[in-house]
């Protein structure tokens, strides 16, 4: 390397040190979940201490994927259609779309790109295998999120942190769930145990015991969130609807006890912690079996949607009984994610939790945003990364030690580096 290379290295160090010294950082967090709806972008200010950050949401925006792009992403969930050229192309295309989303959210906040210190982008998961595979003599866990961070940095001129999960998996973790780290920082209480339940494509629960220390927090995927509901509605409407808006279709149906009991036999629900899941289990093939069952059983469209909606509610309550209640009694469960807008699902949750003395509330009830919650989380994760601080909870992911997750891409004209 020549003098120019060492100069760029010094420039990188200076840039990171300047960000680290700021008492308040402006960060864009971006999230694209298993439902593949689009890109959520939150612009936040982060101040306070490392253990008790102060977060202010400046702007939030959700940009839906173009239908043709969404269709191409879904093709990447199947190994037989996820060819390496398609994965590579979509990795860079999503980088372009994420960059546009970040810039749009920054404009909505009334800011300029140069006002932003860093971007944190989760990317789009196309495969996640948290269980170790030892076929070649190594306990390999692996995961694939696409949406090239170098493209985002080049288009926005802002340092970008991406590809978070791999650092946790490299030290024996499942690479998920990651949002509990931010939930611990922002939601824990001194005298109450509360549950944080995100209902995106997959449902995941974070348990925050009263006055919890970081090592006492645990979290896991409860099972399907909106994924099966969305897939059933899409199939029944022949693509005219992709989700049950407000839970209106499910509200007109009755839960079929036979089908519900059959779905409750899925072995995932009884697996020991830590555990995570995804589209690999509850994706197209799973929904196809439900639709096949329906062909030989008289069940209306509304009844079918009501049944798979109650399956999600049951899986959450079952998870509480199985993994939480024997250790802690929760005072409330705070629901976020797209599922919090499904009033039928919320109704099922309230009915099932009422006998257990657990109140069901939403993020909005606490003054937060269900839509922005995960994007805010990745802003916090990115902020920790550039400040060289661990940003995962080994008690949650099962890792041997806490890792500093994220790969840092610097804007064009500077070499990219990793933390």
Image (cartoon, rainbow, N blue to C red):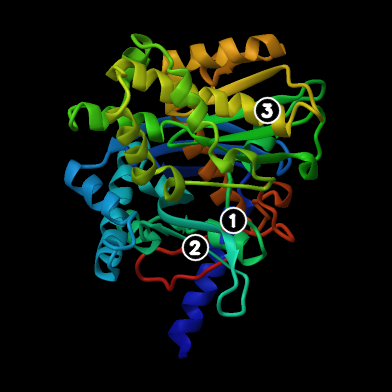
The residue closer to the viewer here, 419 or 410, is 419
Residue 417 placement (x, y as % from top left): 50, 70
Mark 3, secondary structure of its residue: helix
Question: Which residue is drawn at the image coordinates 49% and 63% (left, top)?
Answer: 408
Q: Position of residue 294 (x, y in %)?
A: 32, 28
Q: Is residue 388 above or below residue 414?
A: above
Cβ atoms under marks 2 and 1 closer than 8 Å: yes
Q: Residue at x 29, y 49 (%)?
A: 74
Q: Which residue is mark 1?
A: 385
In the drawing, does residue 179 fall left or right of residue 395?
left
First along the sequence among labels 2 and 3: 3
Residue 408's disc number: 2
- Residue lying at the far front of the rendered structure: 296
Residue labelled with disc 3: 320
Residue depicted at x 62% and y 47%: 275
Question: Nearest the camera: 218 or 393?
Answer: 218
Q: Quadrant of residue 240?
A: top left
Task: Name the quarter where the C terminus is drawn.
Answer: bottom right
Cα–Cα span, label 3 and label 1: 32 Å
Whole-angstrom CA distance, mark 2 to mark 1, is 8 Å
- The 10 Å Cα crowd at callout 2, few under 14, some 14 to 19, many 20 or more, is many
- Compute the Cα span from label 2 to label 3: 37 Å
Q: Earlier in the sequence, mark 3 or mark 1?
A: 3
Q: Between tags 2 and 3, which lies in front?
A: 3
| Residue at 81% across, 39% down | 213
x, y (%) of residue 219?
66, 40
């Amino acid at each position: 390397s020549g003098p120019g290379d060492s100069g760029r290295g010094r420039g990188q160090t200076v840039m990171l040190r300047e960000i680290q010294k700021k008492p308040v950082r402006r960060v864009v967090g971006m999230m694209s979940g298993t439902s593949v709806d689009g890109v959520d972008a939150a612009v936040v200010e982060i101040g306070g201490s490392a253990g008790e950050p102060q977060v202010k949401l400046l702007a939030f925006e959700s940009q839906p994927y173009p239908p043709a792009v969404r269709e191409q992403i879904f093709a990447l969930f199947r190994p037989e259609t996820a060819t390496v050229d398609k994965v590579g192309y979509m990795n860079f295309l999503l980088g372009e779309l994420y960059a546009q989303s970040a810039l749009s959210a920054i404009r909505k906040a009334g800011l300029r790109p140069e006002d932003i210190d860093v971007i944190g982008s989760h990317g789009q998961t196309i495969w996640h295998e948290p269980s170790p595979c030892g076929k070649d003599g190594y306990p390999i866990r692996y995961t694939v999120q696409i949406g090239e961070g170098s493209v985002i940095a080049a288009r926005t001129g802002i340092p970008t942190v991406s590809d978070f999960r791999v650092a946790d998996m490299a030290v024996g973790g499942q690479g998920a769930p990651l949002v509990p780290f931010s939930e611990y920082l922002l939601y824990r209480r001194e005298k109450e145990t509360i549950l944080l339940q995100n209902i995106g494509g997959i449902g995941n629960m974070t348990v925050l015991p009263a006055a919890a220390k970081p090592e006492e927090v645990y979290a896991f995927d409860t099972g399907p969130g909106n994924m099966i509901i969305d897939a059933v509605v899409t199939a029944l409407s022949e693509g005219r609807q992709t989700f049950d808006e407000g839970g209106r279709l499910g509200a007109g149906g009755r839960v079929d006890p036979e089908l519900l009991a059959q779905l409750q036999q899925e072995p995932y629900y009884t697996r020991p912690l830590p555990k995570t899941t995804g589209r690999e289990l509850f994706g197209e093939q799973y929904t196809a079996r439900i639709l096949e069952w329906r062909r030989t059983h008289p069940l209306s469209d509304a009844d079918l949607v009501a049944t798979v909606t109650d399956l999600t509610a049951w899986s959450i309550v079952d998870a509480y009984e199985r993994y939480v209640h024997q250790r802690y009694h929760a005072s409330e469960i705070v629901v976020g994610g797209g599922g919090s807008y499904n009033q039928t699902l919320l109704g099922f949750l309230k009915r099932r939790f009422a006998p257990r003395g657990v109140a069901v509330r939403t993020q909005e009830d606490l003054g937060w945003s269900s839509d922005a919650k995960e994007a805010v989380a990745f802003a916090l994760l990115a902020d920790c990364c550039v400040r060289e601080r661990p940003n995962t909870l080994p008690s949650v992911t099962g890792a041997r030690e806490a890792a500093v997750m994220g790969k840092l891409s610097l804007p064009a004209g500077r070499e990219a580096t990793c933390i």
